[in-house]
Image (cartoon, rainbow, N blue to C red):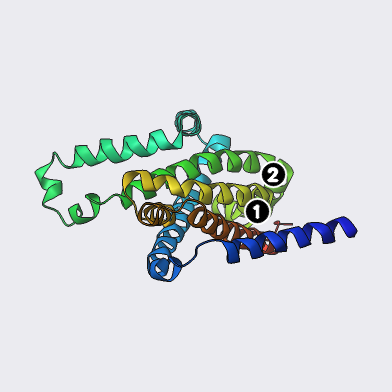
C-alpha cells in the first residue's frame, strides 16, 4: 500500500543517514567488548529465565492445590517481589547479602568466595527471583484454568498424581501460559541492564563505557537500541514457533 511504501522509504532514508552521517569509527575497536557484554547479557537472561521458571511452576501449582501454609508463603513471596522495584531488590541483595557473606570467615575461606565476591551471582539471583514471582502468578492462573473434568478423567483412567501432573495438568497449563510467558521473557530482557548498577559488565555497561571514552551520545545508544530490537525480534519469533509446537494436552 502507498502509505506503507512511504514509511519504508522514510525508514531506509533514516537508516542511511545514521550510517553515513554519524561517527562510527570507534566501532571496530570496541567490537570485542560489545561481544563480551552481549554474551553476559544473554547468559544472565537465559539462566535467570530457566531458574525462574523452575521456581514459578511450584509457586503456581501450590497456590492452586497446595496446603494453606504453602499457599500463603507462595502468595506472599509473589506479592512482595511484584510489589517492589526490581532495582531496589537488586541493591538489597547485592549490598545486603554481599556484606553479610563477608562477615563469616567460613564463607570467605570456602571455594564459593571467589564467586560470591563478584557481582554477577547477585544479579542472577535477583533476576531469577523476579521472573519467578511474575511467572508464578501467571502459572497460578494457568493451573487454575485447566478444567477439573480433565484432571478427574485422567484419575479415572488410573493415572497416579504425578502422571496426571506430567501428562495433563502441566501441558495444558503451559499451553495457556505460553503467550504471557513470551511477553515476560521480553520484559526480562529489558530488565537485564539494571545489573550494570552493581558493576556487572553487560551490554549496557559496555555501551556506557563507550560513551564515556568517545564522548559520543547518540551513536552508542542507537547501536544499543538496534541490538535490543534484534534480540527482542528473535525471541518473539522463537517463542511463537514454540507456542505452536507445545502440546495442549488434548
Residue drawn where x is 42% and y is 64% of the image:
34
Q: Please, what secondary structure does the residue beneath circle 2 have?
A: loop
Q: Quadrant of the N terminus?
A: bottom right
Q: Please, what secondary structure does the residue beneath circle 1 have?
A: helix
Pick the residue in front: 132 or 21.
21
Residue 160 shown left or right of residue 210 in the figure: right
Pick the residue in front: 196 or 92.
196
Residue of label 1: 168
Residue drawn where x is 32% and y is 38% of the image:
93
Question: Residue 235: x, y in percent?
Answer: 60, 60
Residue of label 2: 146
Label 1, label 2: how far apart the Cα atoms are = 9 Å
Residue 180 shown left or right of residue 106 in the figure: right
Residue drawn where x is 45% and y is 37% of the image:
86
Give the label on residue 220, or none.
Answer: none
Which quadrant would residue 249 be assigned to in this image? bottom right
Amino acid at each position: 500500500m502507498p502509505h506503507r511504501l512511504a514509511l519504508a522509504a522514510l525508514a531506509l532514508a533514516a537508516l542511511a543517514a545514521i550510517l553515513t552521517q554519524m561517527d562510527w569509527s570507534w566501532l571496530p575497536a570496541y567490537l570485542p567488548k560489545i561481544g563480551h557484554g552481549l554474551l553476559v547479557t544473554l547468559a544472565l537472561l537465559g539462566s535467570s529465565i530457566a531458574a525462574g521458571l523452575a521456581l514459578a511452576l511450584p509457586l503456581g501449582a501450590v497456590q492452586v492445590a497446595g496446603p494453606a501454609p504453602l499457599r500463603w508463603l507462595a502468595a506472599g513471596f509473589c506479592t512482595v517481589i511484584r510489589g517492589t522495584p526490581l532495582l531496589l531488590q537488586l541493591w538489597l541483595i547485592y549490598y545486603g547479602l554481599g556484606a553479610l557473606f563477608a562477615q563469616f570467615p567460613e564463607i570467605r575461606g570456602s571455594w564459593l568466595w571467589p564467586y560470591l565476591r563478584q557481582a554477577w551471582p547477585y544479579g542472577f539471583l535477583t533476576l531469577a527471583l523476579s521472573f519467578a514471582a511474575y511467572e508464578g502468578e501467571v502459572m497460578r492462573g494457568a493451573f487454575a484454568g485447566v478444567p477439573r473434568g480433565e484432571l478427574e478423567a485422567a484419575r479415572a483412567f488410573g493415572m497416579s498424581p504425578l502422571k496426571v501432573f506430567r501428562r495433563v495438568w502441566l501441558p495444558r497449563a503451559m499451553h495457556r501460559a505460553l503467550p504471557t510467558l513470551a511477553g515476560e521473557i521480553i520484559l526480562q530482557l529489558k530488565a537485564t541492564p539494571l545489573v550494570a548498577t552493581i558493576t556487572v559488565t553487560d551490554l549496557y555497561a559496555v555501551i556506557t563505557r563507550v560513551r564515556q571514552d568517545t564522548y559520543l551520545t547518540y551513536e552508542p545508544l542507537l547501536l544499543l537500541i538496534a541490538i535490543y530490537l534484534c534480540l527482542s525480534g528473535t525471541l518473539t519469533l522463537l517463542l511463537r514457533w514454540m507456542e505452536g509446537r507445545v502440546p495442549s494436552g488434548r
